[in-house]
Amino acid sequence: MGLYEGYLTYRIRRTGAEGPDHVALVITERDLLEDGAYETLTDFIAWALEYASQITVYVSVLDRAAVPTLRRDLESLDAPRAVAVRGPEDDAPADAPIRIGIGLGGKHEFTNAVRTLAESVEAGDLSPDEIDAEDVEGHLVFPAEPDLVIKTGAERLSDFMIWQSVYSELYFTDVNWRDFRKRDFLRAVREYRNRSRRFGR
């Protein structure tokens, strides 16, 4: 660990604050075309696991034709814990410690959850009055809510985990993925621990 990374780690510990227990990362398919991009992702997962028990990575995709190749590469990622990869055609919830979504738009995910609940109502298995937030969450591919969402390269989230990230702490960095280092991750954790979470209140 470098001197500056050691300093940041010290400052994080000095805050005495908790978490984040669930860290999410938003990158793009173009980020993964850069040399060393998958090595950086493997490193990111290792850094995050020093603080969190759950990690979600969302890869924003413009070209749907790239999804099969991305999925194959991400499924072979060298990770220390179980990885669940989901693409645009997957509806099954993912409960592995490390979850990766490829082009899995939040609008699409939420629409599928509502459609499934509507079908249950139409079949007489569920009353509209009985539907609550837990019913919706139970039909999301990534139901867990991240504590911290890190977005590299630009200050916008794209179509990412619309339901789940409503109370998350968002951290934007202008550092591009190809240049992202442990010090950038530690800055995000330090910022998170220095914030006062309000959960919409």
Image (cartoon, grey):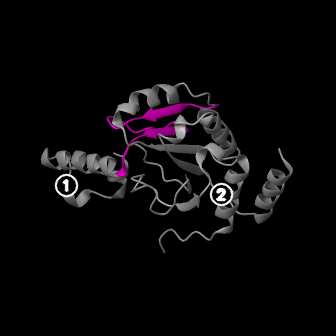
Q: Residue at x 25, y 51 (%)?
A: 114
The reply to whether dot 2 and dot 1 touch (C-beta < 8 Å) is no
Query: Magenta span: helix, strand or loop, mainly?
Result: loop
Residue 102 within the segment the image draws in magenta: yes
Rendering quarter of residue 141: top left
Mark 2 closeness class: few <14, some 14–19, many ≥20 residues within 10 Å: many
Residue 62 in sight in this render = yes
Please tell me which residue lies in front, 39 or 106: 39
**Mark 2 → mark 1, Cα distance in angstroms:** 43 Å
* Disc assigned to residue 88: none
Is 15 or 188 nearer to us in this picture? 188
Crowd band around label 1 with a 10 angstrom C-alpha radius: few (<14), some (14–19), many (20+): few
Q: Nearer the viewer, residue 89 or 38?
A: 38
* Residue 64 magenta-highlighted: no
- Where's residue 174, x and y in %? 59, 57
Disc 2 marks a residue whose amino acid type is Ala
> Which label number is shown at residue 188?
2
Disc 1 residue type (three-letter):
Ser
Residue placed at 49% from the left, 75% from the top? 201
Q: What SS does tag 2 mark?
A: helix
Q: Secondary structure at mark 1?
A: loop
Q: Residue at x 54, y 24 (%)?
A: 76
Q: For mark 1, what is the residue?
A: 127
Magenta extent: 80-106
Q: Earlier in the sequence, mark 2 or mark 1?
A: 1
- x%, y% of residue 11? 80, 61
